[in-house]
Amino acid sequence: MQKLHNNRVITILGSTGELGSQLANYLIKKQKDALLVVRKGHLEKLKQTIKLNDCLQILEVSTLFDKNLLDKIQNSSKIIFNLTGLVSLSFSEKVYPHVLLINGFFPSLLVQSGKKFQVPIVYASTQRMKILTQRRDIKIWISRAIREFNSFIDETNIKTNFENDALAFTKKFLLNHPLPSNINIYELSKALGETMLGQSDNSIILRISSYYGPRCSTRRTVGRLIFSRLLGQEAVEKEEVRDFLYVQDLNEVFEKLINFIPGKLYIRYCCSGTNTSKSDIITKIIEKTPDDGGVLKILDGNDIEIFKPSGRWLKNALKRNPTKLNDGLAKTIRSVRKLYFSKNPMAIIERLHALYDQIKQKADEQGINSQEVEKIKSRFFRYHDGRWEPHEAFWKPTGLVLGYPFPEPLGEKLISLREEILAKLGLEPGQYWLQDKDALHITIVSYSHYSEAGMNVIPLPSAEVSKAREIIRSYKPIEISFRGALVTNNGSLLVKGFVDNEDLFLLRGELMSKIRGITQQPQNLVHVKLAQILDDVPYELTEEVNRLTSSTDLGCYVINDAKTPQRELLQFKAF
């Protein structure tokens, strides 16, 4: 186990999550010593999101379900910010045990370890907690969960890495005790976590509202809407009235807690008191962005959730008024524009990271969705002679592509990574379909896409090839870095590609505008599809693969030509 310094530091659990990385960067600016606890496979993500310096210690761990590890962390800490957790209102039932384990049961381990060290623990809860506090059935369910988990821990003699045992317990508990009616697993898990922490007088629970601000994730409401608007991508939201908190205000509150000794359980709503509808947020974003941006709209319906927590405590803690929503939105829009849409070569890389993260979000919320997989199987595949055979509309290029095949050693690297991932997922032949090595490609543009042309595969006509050749000849070769794999919620296995300039996207736009019949399907990514998974996979396996292979480096390659469906070469501009 990695040795820690003896001096007491500020410890962040969940330091690669959004709140954790925000706080870590804030502490770096304040030159405060901190310990960042990172799950194995997330170190590269940490380096991407946090500006590391000498004030930081980094502890890479396989699991937090390790009593010896938690004792070691407590002994080195002056305060622990437990910002680890799974956050969404859209988790599928497959993910329920994991949400309950991390958000709800794990805080109990911190409490038990903390009895020896009396270290304050800050727990990030949710503004939605008020919904749950009045329901007797929820209180009974939570009491039973605490009683049975404590019994499980008392009977477990394993000191290190018992996460799988704890997950098995959680699955069994949910099987025996289904969720109370009309309750979201995320909210229930946070209520359980709060109650677990209520067993300690050193617990500080902040019921945090929907925070936003510079460098906040595009998964979150405000960031997602701004990103979609500037990308020219439609976004549709369910109406809500909720509180929105500027992230700088939240970080200031966290800083003030560093030397705070609660003495008894301390629970507060950390909210700004803005109480704003999503419709109003959309209106303000549209007012502050160009008219040709993506369409932002609210789903029709009368079932509107309303949260109106008070901002009194935050105002007292900050000793000033919270940041006004208009000011915070203006700063956030400037940040999103600079981070993802500026002329800085890193901007397009960050934009691609955000787009891949949107895809990964669904996998985080659902794992592999068996219903989505069945739709793909029924539409595109038939089982013949012991193997799945796809319709050519599923895989065959119809327009212009890069690769088809890729140069070596990239082709071999892609195949090796695919074999490694399928083995980690525990899949056998018959549970997946593999793209042929010489057919692997990145789509520049499609001529016919099944979403528009159905199952009719219509390749780029030869009469249009000469026009495409002239267009492609005016562009430089495309340099692509291949880094990281991703298993999606519909069972696709992708490798992520990154470019550091806009040439590929400008090329796509010119081809779409000048060649008749080119599909107008937006092409914002630079990915390679390696395989299609055709069976169910346990959530923990997809989570592990997406975590451990998220930054696998396959190298950087210059692609000197595009190809037609008939593999005719169209050369880029010579150097």
Image (tube, rainbow, N blue to C red):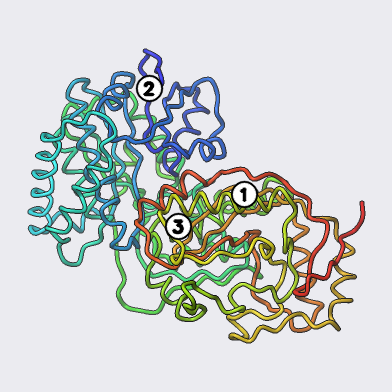
Q: Amino acid at mark 1?
A: Glu
Query: Label 3: few (<14), some or many (≥20) within 10 Å?
Result: some
Q: Residue at x 22, y 20 (%)?
A: 117
Residue indicated by mark 3 = 361
Q: Is residue 374 left or right of residue 330?
A: left
Give whichever of 121, 468 is nearer the camera.
Answer: 468
Between discs 2 and 1, the one toward the N terminus: 2
Query: Label 2: few (<14), some or many (≥20) within 10 Å?
Result: few
* Residue closest to the far top: 6
Q: Amino acid at mark 2?
A: Met
Q: Is residue 314 left or right of residue 31?
A: left
Between discs 2 and 3, the one toward the N terminus: 2
Figure quadrant of residue 460: bottom right
Q: Amino acid at mark 3?
A: Gln
x, y percent for residue 487:
48, 57
x, y percent for residue 82:
32, 36
Q: Which of the labelled discs sits on residue 68, or is there none?
A: none
Q: Which of the labelled discs sits on residue 1, or is there none?
A: 2
Quick one: SS at disc 3? Answer: helix
Residue indicated by mark 1 = 350
Label 2, label 3: how many angstroms apart (C-alpha)? Answer: 32 Å
Quarter of the picture holding the N terminus: top left
- Image height check: is 56 above or below 427? above
